[in-house]
């Protein structure tokens, strides 16, 4: 028996719209990038496939503080660009699970020795979020996502500088800064990656920094310094901003 995939009328219509030639889309008053943004999941309605409800609250709150909205030039933030969705889908996929895991491991080795953690990315997130939330409960009587922005920033700084001792929580294979580095790296990747991977909704981050995206050629602009790139980005699926 075939399983029926649940879809909404809005998603069906937008999916049909995305299948039309670019010229047809423009006649309907939408650019391909606008249509792609509308077809992308709404962050508030998205149901995480890897993270639990509590973990999802942490990811949402942390990503929002790592890349808040309203930066230079009023750039979009992590939430406006669906960064948490990118992280959730990456952890659910091969990136979160498949990694070379043959020891020996030396968790205290310098960074130049490469990946030395006997944990997969999925386990790093599960462990890091659990210990961080526990620390917040002990010190603030609240979960991380319930803290005010200043306290959230302080907790993230404590993670970055190993101010939160994971060993005190019984974790000997992971330190706070390693969890923070994984979180920060994935947040940046979700912000700047092609929208096909779940983040950078509507190519907003590319638009903000003037990145051309997957255009076949833009060499004529490489040496034109201090000249705004006028063409706008193109996604791997051909959407143009």
Image (cartoon, rainbow, N blue to C red):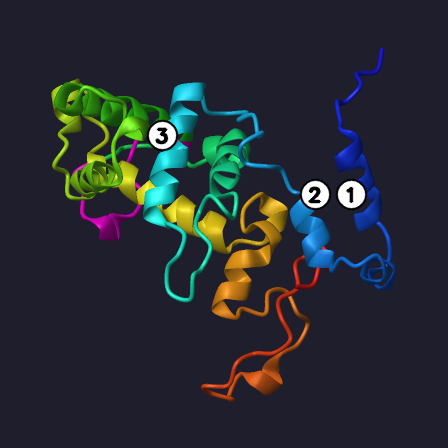
Q: Are marks 3 and 1 in contact (CB under 8 Å)?
A: no
**Does residue 171 appear to the left or right of 214 in the view shown?**
left
**Number of dots carrying numbers:** 3
At x 76%, y 22%, the residue is 5
Does 115 lie within the magenta span? Answer: yes
The residue identified by callout 2 is 39
State whether residue 171 appears in this view.
no
Label 3 Cα neighbours within 10 Å, binned few <14 / some 14-19 / many ≥20: many
On the image, the x and y values in percent for residue 182 come to 34, 41
- Magenta run includes residue 27: no
Position of residue 52 relative to residue 9, above or below, is above
List the residue tagged with mark 3: 58
Front residue of 74 and 126: 74
Of labels 3 and 1, earlier in sequence is: 1
Magenta stretch: give its range.
107-121
Quarter of the image with the N terminus in it: top right
Q: Which residue is mark 1?
A: 14
The secondary structure making up most of the magenta span is: loop
x and y percent of residue 67 in the render? Answer: 37, 50
What is the quadrant of the C terminus in the image? bottom right
Q: In what element is the residue under mark 2?
A: helix
């Amino acid at each position: 028996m075939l399983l029926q995939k649940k879809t909404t009328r809005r998603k069906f219509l937008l999916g049909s719209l995305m299948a039309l030639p670019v010229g047809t889309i423009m006649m309907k008053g939408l650019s391909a990038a606008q249509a792609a943004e509308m077809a992308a999941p709404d962050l508030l309605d998205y149901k995480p496939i890897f993270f639990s409800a509590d973990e999802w609250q942490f990811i949402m709150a942390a990503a929002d503080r790592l890349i808040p909205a309203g930066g230079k030039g009023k750039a979009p933030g992590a939430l406006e660009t669906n960064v948490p969705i990118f992280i959730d889908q990456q952890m659910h996929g091969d990136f979160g699970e498949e990694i070379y895991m043959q020891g020996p491991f030396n968790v205290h080795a310098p960074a130049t020795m490469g990946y030395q953690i006997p944990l997969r990315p999925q386990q790093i997130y599960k462990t890091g979020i659990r210990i961080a939330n526990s620390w917040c409960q002990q010190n603030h009587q609240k979960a991380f996502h319930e803290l005010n922005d200043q306290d959230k920033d302080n907790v993230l700084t404590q993670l970055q500088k190993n101010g939160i001792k994971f060993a005190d929580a019984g974790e000997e294979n992971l330190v706070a800064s390693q969890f923070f580095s994984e979180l920060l790296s994935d947040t940046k990747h979700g912000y700047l990656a092609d929208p096909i991977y779940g983040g950078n909704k509507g190519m907003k981050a590319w638009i903000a920094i003037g990145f051309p995206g997957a255009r076949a050629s833009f060499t004529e602009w490489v040496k034109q310094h201090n000249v705004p790139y006028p063409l706008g980005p193109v996604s791997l699926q051909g959407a143009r901003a």
